[in-house]
Image: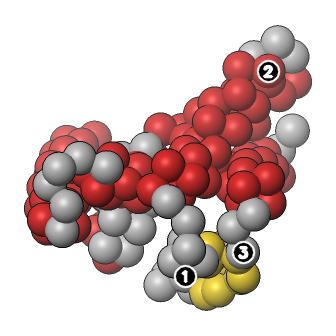
Amino acid sequence: MTGLFALAAAVLLHEAGHLAAARVLGIPFRRGIGRIGGLRLVFDFSRVGYWRELAVHAAGPLTGILGAVLAAQFPGLAVFGGFSFVLAAVNLLPCEGLDGGGILRCLLRLTPLGLSADGIAGVVSRLVRAVFWLFAAREGLRGGNVSVLLFASAIMLTG
């Protein structure tokens, strides 16, 4: 499986996980345009509880991890499995704009913190983004790999 096709398949699997969970839980959605120009699914969580919202956020990364585990059984799918796992891991970072940010926000809202949950999630998101960018900058400068730094910069811009 070629790299670009494997990446596209991993992204489609991830998004299919979100769509399947939303459909099962009766949560409406529409397509939108992401901040960096990509397609983005927009879910209407206004009439659902935090547990159902959390399930939709978690469904994409969990589907990707399952895809990676299944792909590991077939040597020809190693690139797809790698992309699926990395996509799931990055999306679980607790940053707004990523699935992990939505999961963190839902978990905090389920605690007695109430309205301050969004503020706490925002602070955690900014801290994780900064640490991730600093790590990527160090690695990019040390090893000459600019792609990691560009990716981290894109993560910074999505928040």
Residue 144 in the image, given as x and y percentages of width and height: 30, 48
Nearer-N-terminus badge (3/2): 3
- Give the labeled residue for mark 2: 70
Nearer-N-terminus badge (1/2): 1
Q: Amino acid at mark 3?
A: Pro
Q: Residue at x 87, y 38 (%)?
A: 1
Label 1 CA crowd tier, 10 Å (few <14, some 14–19, many 20+): few
Q: Residue furthest top?
A: 73
Label 2 CA crowd tier, 10 Å (few <14, some 14–19, many 20+): few
Q: For this rendering, which residue is in front, 107 or 125?
A: 107
Q: Amino acid at mark 1?
A: Gly
Q: For this rendering, which residue is in front, 158 or 48?
A: 48
Tell me the element at label 2.
helix
Residue 104 in the image, given as x and y percentages of width and height: 32, 50
Q: Residue at x 34, y 65 (%)?
A: 96
Label 3 CA crowd tier, 10 Å (few <14, some 14–19, many 20+): some
Image marks 3 and 2: residues in contact by CB distance under 8 Å = no
Residue 56 in the image, given as x and y percentages of width and height: 60, 54
Q: Nearer the viewer, mark 1 or mark 3?
A: 3
Q: Which mark is residue 28?
A: 3
- Give the labeled residue for mark 1: 34
